[in-house]
Every structure is written in C-alpha cells, then in structure tokens.
Amino acid sequence: MDRSEILRVLMPERTKQIALAWSILRQSHLSEDAYQDMLARVFENDGIFEGPQHLRDWSWKVLRNRCFELIRQQKYQVTLLDESILNLVDAELERRDTSDMPLRADALRNCIDGLSEKSRETIRMRYFEGLRGKQVAEKLGSKPAAVYKALQRIYVTLAQCIQRKLTALDTGDSIS
C-alpha cells in the first residue's frame, strides 16, 4: 500500500485511535505523540499489509503497544485501566460508524481555513510536518506547554466549528 492509500484507510480511524491512546495515557499531547509514532511505524512497514482491514488491525495493536511502551519508560505517572476495560474501549471505538467522515473532513478543512495564521501554522507543523510538540515549540520560539495549550484551544475551536457546520448541513444550509 502506498502512503496515500494508508492515509485514506487510517484517517477515519484517527479520532478513535487518539481516544484509545488517551484512555491509556491520560494526557492529550502524549496521546498525539503515540498516534504519530504509530503512523511512523505503519509507513516504515507499508509493504506488509494485505489490505485495509489488516492495516487497521495492525495499527490499533501498534498504537496500544506504543502507549504501554511510553508507560514502561516511566516518563510520567499514569493510572491504567483494567485490561478488560481497555478491550471494551477497543471494541467500542472500532465499532463506531464512520460514514460521515467525508462531511466531517470537509467541515474540518473549512474550519481550519477560518483559524488565525499562527494557529494554522501550528497545525501545519504538528500534523502535516509530523513534528512533536517540543519541536513545534522550538520553531515557534515558545515553551512546549504553551504549544500544548494552544493546540487544546485549537481542538476545541475546531470541534465547535465542525459541529456548527454539520448542524447547518442537517438543516439544509451550506457548509461554508
């Protein structure tokens, strides 16, 4: 599978996978980092996938293992959920309907366009260049904590914007 095929398969899973990482790590920025690490491993092993389902299954396992690896490194304290609860979370996240993802993606693109230049730059470095929070902070000349707070504000702003746009679509209005 090439990079664009991999992204086409995994992007609808992104929110669910980050939710899984957060349920294990309990820190947003570490969850994002674990997700990025998983994507890097997927791209490094792009030749092994037998199809989209194999890729999805493999990515979930790699993400979960990366979260546990971060915990074992003891860079921070975390409260682990029981294994049976994590299995329930995995099953629930994998089961959720993703049929509205194309509409959500359009709304996201539109909402990103509405962000300030600095916010768009932060998003670009973090997600399109794949930089970690500390690297984004270095490039912006700020502290990592400030970047993580800015990212959290951006996430909230984007989530609210997307919800408004999807609600507008439900009532028959335009997405723009």
Image: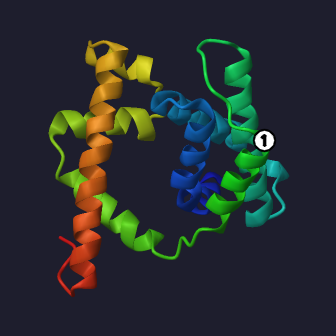
Lateral position of residue 35 relative to residue 105, left or right: right
For the point 32% across and 44% down, the residue is 155
Q: Which residue is mark 1?
A: 83
Q: Where residue 83 sits: x, y (%)?
A: 78, 41
Above or below for 74 versus 117: above
For the point 78% across and 47% down, the residue is 84
Lateral position of residue 71 relative to residue 139, left or right: right
Above or below for 138 versus 161: above
Which one is in front, 82 or 16?
82
Q: Where residue 176 sits: x, y (%)?
A: 17, 70
Lateral position of residue 29 relative to residue 106, left or right: right
Label tally: 1
Identified by mark 1, the residue type is: Glu
Which one is in front, 131 or 93?
93
To which quarter of the image does residue 45 belong? top right
Lateral position of residue 3 relative to residue 110, left or right: right
For the point 52% across and 76% down, the residue is 99
Which one is in front, 5 or 110?
110
